[in-house]
Image: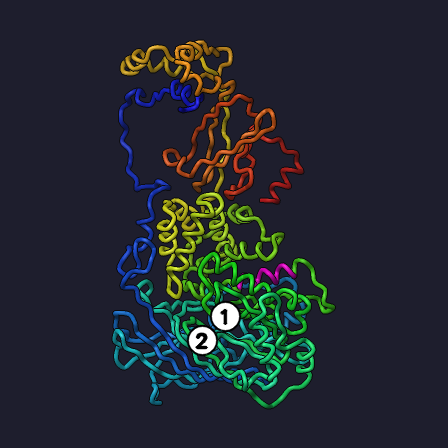
Amino acid sequence: MKKLSTLLLSMMLVSTSIFAQEVEKKSQAGHTDNNKFRQLKDVLATPNTQRTASGAPGHEYTQQKVDYAMEIRLDETNNKLYGDEKITYHNNSKNKLEYLWLQLDQNMRAPDSQTPLAESKGASGWQTPEKFVTDNMGKAKDFGFNIEAVKYEDGRDLPHTINKTMMRINLAQPLAPGAKFTFKIKWNYLINNSVEDGGRSGFEQFTDGNKAYTIAQFFPRLCVYNNVEGWQNMQFWGRSEFALEFGDYDVKITVPADHILDATGQLLNEKEVLSKTQRSRLEKARKSYKDPVFIVTQEEAEENEKEGTSKTKTWHYKAKNVRDYAFASSRKYIWDAMAVNINGKNIMAVSLYPKEGNPLWEEHSTRVVANTLEEYSKLTFDYPYPKAISVHAKRQGMEYPMICFNYGRPNPDGTYSDRVKNGMIGVITHEVGHNFFPMIVNSDERQWTWMDEGLNSFVEILAELDYDPNFNTGNLPKDIVRYMSIDQKNLSPIMSQGDYVKNFGPNAYTKPAAGLYLLRKTIMGPELFDFAFRTYSQRWMFKHPTPADFFRSMEDASGMDLDWFWRGWFYTTDYSDIGVKEVKQLYVTDKKSDRVKELIKTNPRAKAYFDSLGDLVFLTDKKEDANIDKISQYLKSLPADKKATLKTVPKYIYQVEFEKPGGLLMPIIVELTYADGSKKREQYPAQIWRKDDTKVFKTYSSEQEIKSIVIDPDLETADIDTKNNSWPKQKQDKFNKFKNKVKQ
């Protein structure tokens, strides 16, 4: 049985819209569908046999495979890297390929690079003498790939064309579907000092004369070819990252004999490069699930870094089904590791760091790696690779399959602040998490930065809170409010290519993460969201998903229509702002309202309708007209069993008008506070705005007076203006107005 308040309202709130006076129709221009709930079919790619309407790969989905066999040599004296690589390209598509495209990322910093030319840079009003000399008197360093040879497998010269950061291999005959092509490239380049010259990889020079090398983007790599982009050969300008194919790697890396090295893949020649003691410790680490085990201690690393050597060692690795390759090498490295049990499979969590990273790194790094693998696996899929490595680098935070480079250095005396510690824990969690997005769920970073950075930043929050429940993860989605409030000319939709975004960090990291957090906590709920997110992740393991595949998978697996959310949050720069416009206290009366009187007077149909209903009660905001006699009479006429199911006549009735100055659709979360201090919350789905995008009404009846109404009390919807969120409106002094402005 319905509550009495509901019955009364259904009796009292008679719709009058059908009795509106007929007016002469005015000629109006038509419009396209501008309803914010319209489906995304006009935006998303048409489903096909490779990418289905459900968001899953189709039965004819294909992707290319590229295998690399490389011999790499590190020249520490001259900071140069030499490489010989043999590439085998497998054409798994159904198309003939007239040429192949490779990425030459190191050319971004070559002397003839256009990257500096594309930057707007005025003269600085003040700078250090060192910076003045560097900017105005320094000679360009000879960075960039030196391609010594490109040859067929049999040694003949292979025609090729270099276009800045891309190289085209000109095939004599098109590569047929199902065929493979093997060729060789010999190259070298000058390694950049990542501290002085910048860059995602390079070396750090320490005051003791030693160096630590974190090497990535170091070899010519195949571009992605698929049915979405064709060849993804967009130039590398330094910001938007990489689109890469999966393949198998066989890599031999020759470095000074006293270096400790680790890399993507499994080490095949432990006996040749590790001492008996180191192998014994490593074996112990493979069985240690609680604490890391030192394979190289700090004392041993300090002793090792005192003397150089002219001898070399070659470390041999193999990696299966990875999309990239990286390594780190230094005589300064401390090395520790522990095992992680991922559903019965042993995974190694590993750290490499110089003494300058301690005591912070030995306390946290490997434990953070282990925690990240565990938590991401719960939310996505079981981590499939044999290890994950965290390498200390002074100014880097960068990810590659099984290995990442992370900042976070204590003061020289070993002390460190919570900010430095949390920064290190955060960057390790984030970069190790990238093993899942995009190293396995292999989205196109060059096009859609948010698909790896945004998704990863969201999962990172959950992993950090598991590592430390008091970890300062920020406050999403509130943290995105300030960004969404800035001048629209400085905003770009999330669905923008990363090189052309003004505020790259908030756009690619924070806003997508805030959107997913909002979906999980407020719109979908953890159960529906987690199942859908896991479904997407598992569908696209070791494949190339697009934004459409993500959007469709989330809806397909949850049974929720979220097109309104994707369209608003990802495709526009609209903001969220919902407020209480007006609250009226209403009273039951037997007097007709002025509106009803006018309808009866001017519309015969309305008069006939009201006459047919007999006795009516109405709602008015005039307290002096209150009269509940007809309600009392109606209640007396009811049988006893029906009366027993009813509550008492409500003492208070309120009509609340909600407004939406912001363009984004959002649920309305309302907290009512009653006279006795008790509170009640209601949440109305975003669909409440489907018939009117500017205002909606709700009516509340209660036994107690409502003292206050607050919208979004926990700041869940990224509302950029909370001044209209309360009734009665809160009075603010000048200090509080300033404080709220600063918060936003």
Q: Is residue 614 left or right of residue 205?
A: left
- Position of the N terminus, as image quadrant, is top left
Query: Looking at the image, do the residues carrying marks 2 and 1 touch, with CB atoms under 8 Å apart?
Result: yes
Mark 2–mark 1 Cα distance, whole angstroms, equals 10 Å
Give x and y (percent) for residue 430: 54, 61
Q: Residue at x 43, y 16 (%)?
A: 643
Give x and y (percent) for residue 541: 40, 63
Q: Residue at x 44, y 67 (%)?
A: 242
- The image quadrant of residue 247 is bottom left
Magenta segment, prevailing SS (helix, strand or loop) = helix
Give x and y (percent) for residue 110: 49, 76
Q: Tag on residue 319?
A: 2
Asked if the stretch drawn in magenta spans residue 425, the answer is yes
- Position of the C terminus, as image quadrant, is top right
Label 1 environment density (alpha carbons within 10 Å; few <14, some 14–19, many ≥20): many
Give the residues drawn in magenta, as a range: 421-431
Q: Is residue 132 left or right of residue 44?
A: right
- The image quadrant of residue 427 is bottom right
Q: Nearer the viewer, residue 663 or 656?
A: 656
Give x and y (percent) for residue 109: 50, 73
Q: Which secondary structure lies at badge 2?
A: strand
Q: Amino acid at mark 2?
A: Ala
Q: Nearer the viewer, residue 530 or 662?
A: 530
Asked whether residue 163 is in view, the answer is no
For marks 2 and 1, the one nearer the N-term is: 2
Q: Residue at x 53, y 57 (%)?
A: 460
Task: State whether residue 588 is above or below residue 245.
Answer: above
Q: Tag on residue 402?
A: 1
Label 2 environment density (alpha carbons within 10 Å; few <14, some 14–19, many ≥20): many
